[in-house]
Amino acid sequence: MVTTVPSARNFDIKDPSLAADGRRRIEWAGREMPVLRQIRESFAAERPLDGIRMLVCAHITTETANLAMTFQAGGADAVLCASNPLSTQDDVAAALVEEGIPVFAIKGEDNETYYRHIKSALEHRPQLVIDDGADVVSMLHKEYSALLPDVMGATEETTTGVVRDRAMEAAGVLTFPVVAVNDADTKHFFDNRYGTGQSTIDGILRATNILLAGKTIVVAGYGWCGKGIATRLRGMGSRVVVTEIDPVKALEAAMDGFTVTTMDRAAALGDLFVTATGNINVIDRAHFAQMKDGAILANAGHFNAEVNIDALEDMSGEGRRTLRPMVEEFKLADDQRIILLGEGRLINLAAAEGHPASVMDMSFANQALAAAYLVREGRGLEPKVYRVPHEIDMEIARLKLAAMGVEIDTLTDEQHTYLNSWEAGT
């Protein structure tokens, strides 16, 4: 039974003996996270989160561990649970528990265990929530309304989660402010584009070891994640086809030089399909029937809903087998074979290690500073979804540039006056 206030003994992880391996990998990731390291040093001195009960629902990775230890340095009483059943790194979970940070997460946990872990973490009665996909915020409002008065606010890491939070705001059910960390410029311009672009390909290659050059690859969605994926696949020598529902994004993809068409037409063209839309059944029953024998499906969106797995299972009957770790084959009619990677979950975390630490440095710097902002201001904010304050975004960019050894210009007094004047003309 999980007690009200977890201690280092209250956890559910795979194997505590993995902690030494986790510590080394956390240290390695930390070397690529200089901005978060500076924030941790300031947090240790100023203790902006002192005594705050936090629930961090995130991918339990080496980068997340560095964020959790930053919260700990700032005085927070934090507990962690997974935001995806396949994204946990078990050695990292063990290392965090050894550091006195309770973790409820096991890689490969089933859905029942996944939600049980979230509920175990909620026993902590959080005052501040760091969410990744909005599962905790949603569950709080649906099943744990008695805890809502304690919550001063939440942050959200993903596009999918921000969409859910905004839907709650629009429905008038959101009871506390949510800072959309995903929408910070220093997050989505870099994490979603460069991080997802690289790590998605990393996951596909680790799972399959296929050659991308010369293959036709369909990318569903041309948001920042889709842009990153499509651009990097083209750099690997792939012929990239983009599908979209947004006319502006479709136009952008076309002018970026990609073939743009519908999924109905693209289904017969692709050797590999990558979804990055945040929506449901983007690849559906009718598309499976049109696909080439051996077509490979991978998902880079947050939830395993983008590929209609139920329909795929129904069409294959008993003709399903595992070929390699994270690689399943479904045999359909006429011996047509469809390959699904990573159970349709986030391929970059199911089959690889997620985003490189360097890009997560900015994302998690936003999380840390947004958490401190909510502790200061959360009780005075309306229950709405907010962007990260502009000054936080700019400060993170400045710190990252400094860490990279990059210098930029600053405005002179004359230039500043000119830009703020309506009287100076051409």
Image (cartoon, grey):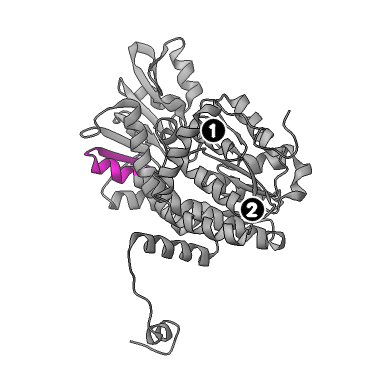
The magenta stretch spans which residues?
229-247
Magenta stretch encompasses residue 246: yes
x and y, in percent, of residue 398 in the image: 42, 65
- On the image, numbered disc 2 is attached to which residue? 75
- The label on residue 293 is none
Residues at marks 1 and 2, CA–CA distance in whole angstroms: 21 Å
- Give the residue at x 41% y 36%: 353
> Does residue 224 appear in the picture of this structure?
no
Describe residue 39's horizontal placement relative to residue 173 as left or right.
left
> Does residue 297 appear in the picture of this structure?
yes
State the quadrant of the N terminus. Answer: top right
Circle 1 — which element? helix
State the quadrant of the C terminus. Answer: bottom left
Circle 2 — which element? loop
Hey, which quadrant is residue 284 in on the image?
Answer: top left
Most foreground residue, 327 or 291? 327
x and y, in percent, of residue 419 in the image: 41, 81
Q: Earlier in the sequence, mark 1 or mark 2?
A: 2
Magenta stretch encompasses residue 1: no
